[in-house]
Image: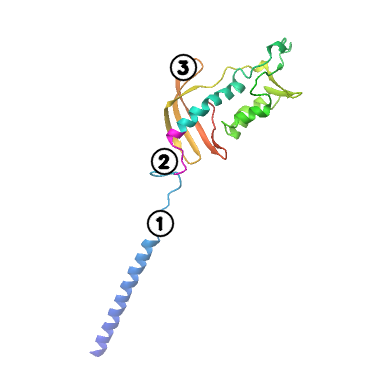
Amino acid sequence: MKKIWAFLLVMLLIAVSAGCTGKDDASSGVASYSVSLPQGSGAGAEASGSAISKEEIKNWLDDNLPKAKEITGIFWGNGLEYDQAAAGEPPADGGQWFVPVTSDTYQSIQEIKTAVETVFTSQFAQDHFYKDGFEGQYKRYIEEDNILKIDLNQMGTNSGFDWQTATIEVVQQSDTKVVVQMENMDNYQTKGEGQLTLEKTDSGWRLASAV
């Protein structure tokens, strides 16, 4: 009889010990779980401390779109003012027709680049402005004897849209990139809608799309 009681006591102690160990493991397992959301995603992403607000985006565009349109016109529109008296007759072969620029603001290619990169990203500027404006066989601007010149045979009409920033809506946003949509109007006063992309650079926010 004593052997039976001893055996039952041992079994009881083993059962109690196993139960305690299970509780510790379960507790430890719960405590070890943690959830981490990627920055700029999930609920409340717009409240991120480093994300630009909708009002800040609108203010930035209000301040910088006029300059962006001016730059667009320099490359894709009528271009910079030039010395009409020095223009003379166009080349008989229809080739490039370089005439001195008379702008008080831009007197060198570097001055144009500096203005461009206060508004647009350097990558967008290289791909869409500099590649044809300053480089290649048929560049639009050259410097000759320290004089900035424009090719009159490359006159354009695109000076950008008029963007209605009061209609702005954010369609995509992270801490370093924002895509907005709003109403606009083209050179023929035709109303439409389009998107602009802004990217955060070391120098601040810059446009990464045509205006």
- Residue 46's tag is 2
Q: Are marks 2 and 1 in contact (CB under 8 Å)?
A: no
Q: Which residue is located at x 51 percent, y 34 percent? A: 198
**Where in the figure is residue 138, as x and y percent of width and height?**
69, 22
Q: Say what amino acid the circle numbered 3 marks.
A: Thr
Q: Which residue is located at x 58 percent, y 17 percent? A: 157
In the rendered view, tell whether residue 102 sits above or below residue 203: above
Q: Name the element at disc 2.
A: helix
On screen, residue 207 versus residue 8, left or right, reads right
Q: Name the element at disc 1.
A: loop
Check disc 2: other Cα within 10 Å, few if <14, some if 14-19, many if 20+: some
Look at mark 3 in the image and give the residue it sits on: 190
| On-image quarter of the N terminus | bottom left
- What range of the chain is rendered magenta? 49-56
**Where in the figure is residue 23, as x and y percent of width and height?**
32, 68
Q: Say what amino acid the circle numbered 1 marks.
A: Ser
Outermost residue on the front side: it is 104
Dot 2 or dot 1, earlier in sequence:
1
What is the distance, in whole Å, between disc 2 and disc 3 at their CAs?
A: 33 Å
Q: Say what amino acid the circle numbered 2 marks.
A: Glu
Dot 2 or dot 3, earlier in sequence:
2
Judging depth in this view, the residue of 5 and 133 nearest the camera is 133
Judging depth in this view, the residue of 115 and 2 nearest the camera is 115
In the rendered view, tell whether residue 190 sits above or below residue 180: above
Judging depth in this view, the residue of 158 and 167 nearest the camera is 167
Answer whether residue 111 is visible to the viewer in this image.
Answer: yes
- Residue 34's tag is 1
On screen, residue 164 versus residue 21, left or right, reads right
